[in-house]
Amino acid sequence: MPTHSQEPDPAAWDPTERLPDTGRPPAGDPPPPGPPPRPEPGPDAGGLAPAGGENTTAVAELEDRWRRARADLDNLRKRHAREQERDRAAERSRTAAAFLPVLDNLELALTHAGADPGAIVEGIRAVRDQAVNVLELLGYPRHAETGVAFDPARHEVVSVVQDPDSVPGTVVEVLRPGYGDGERQLRPAAVSVAKRE
């Protein structure tokens, strides 16, 4: 009797018989209709994977907020620069206005100089005192004191002199007065100081 390979008889197949589940369709069968199954998120995804459209919207919103913040900062810088310039102009104007009476009095002194030459000295001294007063009102008091201890923050030594009548290390003569104190100093006083023995 001839030997035939034993092929399963399709008529003898029982549809209720359970086949082992391999997770994929049997070979040769077409894939089931419909969308492909979504891959399951990995253990680190946490189920929070947003869709692509949500990412685009979030990025667009962040870019918009960044542009607005940048524009606000630029406007703030421009406004601050305008305010600083306005404050500087107001301060220059205030300082110049404070010196106008000094100029007026110098004009008067020059006008009356021919009538009484001796009076011009008094007029110039009065104008000088007025200018010193203006500087003091602006926050720059005059320093021209002698007999005080030398202070390197307020004095600039021009010369050291031997003076038996003065305490060593004190100001003997002010050659050029100083104006202002501390951080608001216009210039230190140029002085001669008594020599230490």
Image (spheres, rainbow, N blue to C red):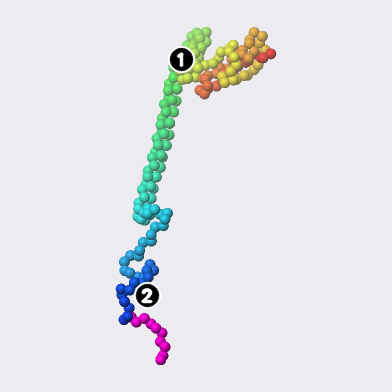
Q: Is residue 142 magenta?
A: no
Q: Quadrant of residue 31?
A: bottom left
Placement of the N terminus among the 4 image quadrants: bottom left
What secondary structure is found at the residue carrying circle 1?
helix
Task: Give the numbered dot on residue 178.
Answer: none
Furthest residue to the right? 197
Residue denoted by label 2: 28
Q: At which x and y percent is residue 5?
A: 41, 84
**Pointer 2 or 1: first along the chain:** 2
- Examine the rendering and report whether any part of residue 40 can be seen: yes
Q: Residue at x 41, y 26 (%)?
A: 90
- Examine the rendering and report whether any part of residue 24 can be seen: no
Q: Nearer the viewer, residue 153 or 103?
A: 153
Furthest residue to the front? 1
Give the amino acid at mark 2. Answer: Gly
Task: Give the numbered dot on residue 105.
Answer: 1
Q: Residue at x 63, y 19 (%)?
A: 158
Q: Nearer the viewer, residue 176 or 83?
A: 83
Label 2 Cα neighbours within 10 Å, binned few <14 / some 14-19 / many ≥20: few
Q: At which x and y percent is residue 30?
A: 35, 72
Q: Nearer the viewer, residue 181 or 137?
A: 181
Q: Is residue 3 magenta?
A: yes
Distance between mark 2 and mark 1 Cα atoms: 115 Å
Give the amino acid at mark 1. Answer: Asn
Magenta segment range?
1-10
Judge whether 196 appears above or below 66 on screen.
Answer: above
Q: Residue at x 38, y 74 (%)?
A: 27
Q: At which x and y percent is residue 25?
A: 36, 70
Q: Residue at x 42, y 23 (%)?
A: 94
Placement of the C terminus among the 4 image quadrants: top right
